[in-house]
Amino acid sequence: MISPGLISTYSACSDAAGIAGNLFAFLLFVSPIPTFRRIIRNQSTEQFSGLPYIYALLSCLICLWYGMPLVCPGIILVATVNSIGAVFQLIYITIFIIYAENTKKMMMSGFLLVVFGLFAIVVFVSMRLLDPPMRQIFVGYLSGATLISMFASPLLIIKLVIRTQSVEYMPLYLSLSTFLMSISFFAYGMLECDPFIYVPNGIGTVLGAVQLALYSYYSKKSGEDSREPLIVSYA
């Protein structure tokens, strides 16, 4: 029989990993602020793409829903981090729409409506058509898929770094935050025995480690510092 003390320690470690993941995720959420300060200052979105924020909002909303007690009880720290992330992405998208050209403005507004529509469909299907076990599996697969695809998106940046042998578009703090957040939620998912959390974050941990290794190699080779992240069409 497992002692109450061991259970308490196990729970404390799980909570600590989840809280750490929330803190490191916050660093990721605030990382685009320099880009949007530039947009506001110039009153133009220039060549920046708003699509990464649209996709990030969809991912945050689905993962937020997965962390809710109605879907998966006991992982409220997943809901908290993604609720904060959804608010940040919505703010960024709003600023982008305000300062975008008319064509981009309409396109981004349309994508935003699609995101809310898809999220509403996910909530409706999971609540009205599925029982609790199937609801958790259905939303879990969706959240895992969106997380994996988000973690895979830096592969384009990694390819760019290798091709140019420059870390200009791969800031150290961004790669480090991604790695620390991923490894924290990987530990949280393992402690909670939830593959929908530890599998995508395990992949994120590996990709984050690859980014840090590339940064170390190419920054020493070129002797340069990375610039602030500018999210462009290839990101």
Image (tube, rainbow, N blue to C red):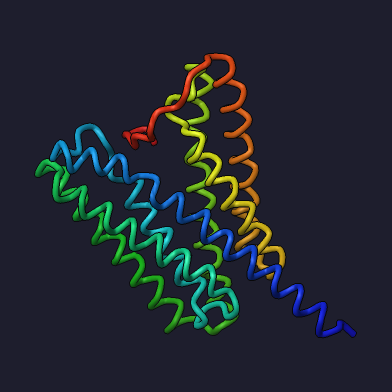
Left/right placement of residue 201 relative to residue 115 reads: right
Image x and y of residue 154, in percent: 49, 37
- Residue drawn at point x = 40 percent, y = 28 percent: 227
Q: Is residue 22 above or below residue 96?
A: below
Image x and y of residue 145, in percent: 52, 56
The answer to which of 42 and 191 lies nearer the viewer is 42
- Residue drawn at point x = 56 percent, y = 28 percent: 215
Image x and y of residue 61, in percent: 40, 65
Image x and y of residue 71, in percent: 52, 78
- Residue drawn at point x = 42 percent, y = 76 percent: 125
Q: Is residue 177 above or below residue 154?
A: below
Where residue 199 sits, quadrant-wise, is bottom right
Q: Quadrant of the C terminus?
A: top left
- Residue drawn at point x = 21 percent, y = 40 percent: 39
Q: Is residue 104 above or below residue 234?
A: below
Q: Quadrant of the N terminus?
A: bottom right
Residue situated furthest right in the rendering = 1
Left/right placement of residue 44 relative to residue 218 reads: left
